[in-house]
Image (cartoon, rainbow, N blue to C red):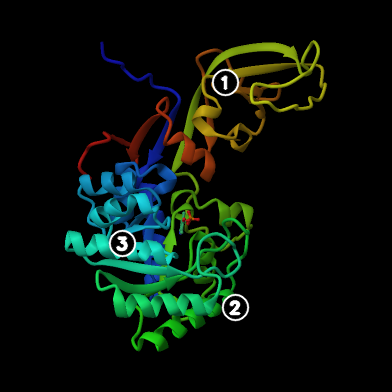
């Protein structure tokens, strides 16, 4: 027996909007002498979406996950392919097989990559990461960075030292500034003077670093960015940072539609002895009397943190849920809901990340009004 997927929950993806966001960003970056690696990990590397990064003008396709790069290559995306999570030693053979460029920060990894490259007869480009205070990946000491770069240049002939890069605004929430970018340029120039040649790339970061391009203040020598969220959703900078000068980017490329499976009037405060929820938490509840509530057929398994959902109807309040259920307060909705109705949500990065990886969620693709099949050549 075949399993025929149910239509909902569904994420509807507007390929034309995505393509337009890619083009808007790549044009501005190119005008500033900056190449763009389009990062596809936020949508699990789904083919029709990854393809728009290419069509919109990205210079490289990037992911943190090798299986997504594999899928992109299998679908004949042109690449070059950049791995943005510094590789595990155990994935070295696949990195060399699948990637053209990787980020790196560990001498032991570089040695392993070098040996694998020599064995496979390939030359892998490497961008060495410098940690400028965000405290995720990268060399902390400038001298370690320069020493490793010099060692690579002189001893690891399977690798091409192609650049120096950094990542900000991820773990340590550090804001990319002109000063931080200048610090990166200084680190790269220290490497350049040690190896006696110019690097191909100085990679200034991700979505958060794009702000400096938008404002026209990115230091000249930064010539590479790795951008995901600001292409896919364009929500972090416009909504969370409150940047008003990026209206050329659309925030509506993705819409979640979920189906109502129960509508009832119930007390807003649980009845009985309050103990522990399904995930081992001890939440508190506000008593607002009897309220109209709706249950949806999707839950934490599909979208991670239910409270990150953004209902399109301002009268809907997300109360919470469990693995497979989402609970809404619908007392104040404009149009009343009944079983079988669909509720629409805007997405943010983490919900998009989960939804595009869930087996229970159907992805539908539209180019303008026209629906496009997943495998359709674009
Ligand atoms: C995920 C990631 C990116 C892209 O981040 P966005 O904020 O989605 O633009 C860039 N660089 C690295 C190293 C990453 O891990």
Q: Kindly indicate whether the residue at mark 2 contacts the one at mark 3 (C-beta within 8 angstroms).
A: no
Specify the quadrant that holds the N terminus. top left
Residue 270 left/right relative to 169: right
Residue under numbered circle 1: 325
User: Quarter of the image holding residue 242?
Assistant: bottom right
Pointer 3 or 1: first along the chain: 3
Count residues near mark 2 (Cα–Cα under 10 Å), then give few for <14, some for 14-19, many for 20+: few
- In the displayed structure, 375 sits above or below 207; it is above
Rendering coords of residue 330 (x, y %): 66, 22
Q: Which residue is drawn at 22% across and 38% down?
A: 376
- Tell me, yes or no, if residue 200 can be seen here: no
The structure residue drawn at horizontal position 45% and vertical position 84%, both measured from the top left corner, is 189
Residue drawn 55% across the image and 28% down it: 300
In the picture, the disc for residue 179 is 2
Query: In the displayed structure, would residue 98 be above or below residue 193?
Result: above
Report the side of 264 relative to 92 (left or right): right
Few, some or many residues within 10 Å of mark 1 (<14, 14–19, 20+): some
Residue occupied by mark 3: 113
Q: Where is residue 117 in the image (x, y as percent from the top left)?
A: 23, 62
Report crowding for label 3: few under 14, some 14 to 19, many 20 or more residues within 10 A (C-alpha): many
Give the quarter of the figure containing the C terminus.
top left
Asked whether 57 or 308 is in front, the reply is 308
Question: Mark 3 to mark 1: distance in Å?
Answer: 45 Å
Residue positioned most to the left: 121
Q: What element carries label 3?
A: helix
């Amino acid at each position: 027996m075949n399993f025929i997927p149910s239509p909902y929950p569904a994420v509807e993806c507007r390929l034309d909007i995505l393509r337009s966001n890619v083009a808007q960003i790549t044009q501005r970056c190119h005008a500033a002498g900056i190449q763009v690696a389009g990062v596809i990990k936020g949508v699990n590397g789904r083919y029709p979406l990854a393809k728009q990064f290419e069509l919109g003008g990205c210079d490289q396709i990037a992911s943190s996950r090798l299986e997504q790069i594999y899928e992109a290559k299998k679908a004949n995306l042109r690449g070059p392919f950049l791995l943005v999570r510094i590789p595990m030693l155990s994935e070295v053979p696949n990195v060399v097989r699948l990637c053209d460029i990787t980020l790196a920060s560990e001498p032991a990894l570089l040695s392993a990559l070098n040996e694998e490259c020599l064995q496979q007869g390939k030359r892998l480009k490497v961008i060495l990461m410098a940690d400028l205070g965000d405290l995720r990946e990268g060399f902390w000491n400038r001298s370690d960075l320069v020493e490793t770069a010099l060692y690579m240049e002189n001893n690891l002939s399977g690798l091409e030292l192609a650049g120096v890069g950094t990542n900000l605004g991820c773990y340590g929430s550090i804001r990319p500034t002109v000063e931080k970018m200048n610090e990166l340029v200084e680190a790269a120039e220290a490497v350049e003077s040690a190896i006696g040649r110019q690097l191909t790339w100085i990679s200034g970061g991700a979505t958060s670093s794009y702000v400096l391009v938008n404002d026209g203040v990115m230091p000249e020598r930064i010539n590479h960015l790795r951008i995901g969220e600001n292409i896919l959703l364009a929500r972090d900078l416009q909504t969370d940072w409150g940047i008003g000068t990026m209206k050329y980017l659309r925030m509506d490329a993705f819409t979640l539609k979920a189906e109502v499976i129960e509508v009832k009037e119930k007390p807003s405060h649980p009845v009985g002895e309050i103990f522990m929820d399904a995930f081992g938490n001890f939440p508190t509840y506000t008593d607002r009397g009897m309220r109209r509530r709706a249950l949806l057929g999707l839950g934490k398994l599909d979208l991670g943190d239910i409270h990150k959902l953004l209902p399109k109807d301002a009268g809907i309040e997300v109360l919470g849920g469990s693995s497979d259920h989402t609970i809404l307060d619908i007392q104040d909705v404009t149009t009343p809901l009944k079983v079988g109705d669909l509720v629409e949500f805007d997405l943010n990065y983490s919900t998009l990340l989960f939804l595009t990886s869930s087996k229970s969620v159907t992805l539908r693709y539209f180019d303008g009004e026209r629906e496009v099949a997943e495998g359709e050549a674009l």
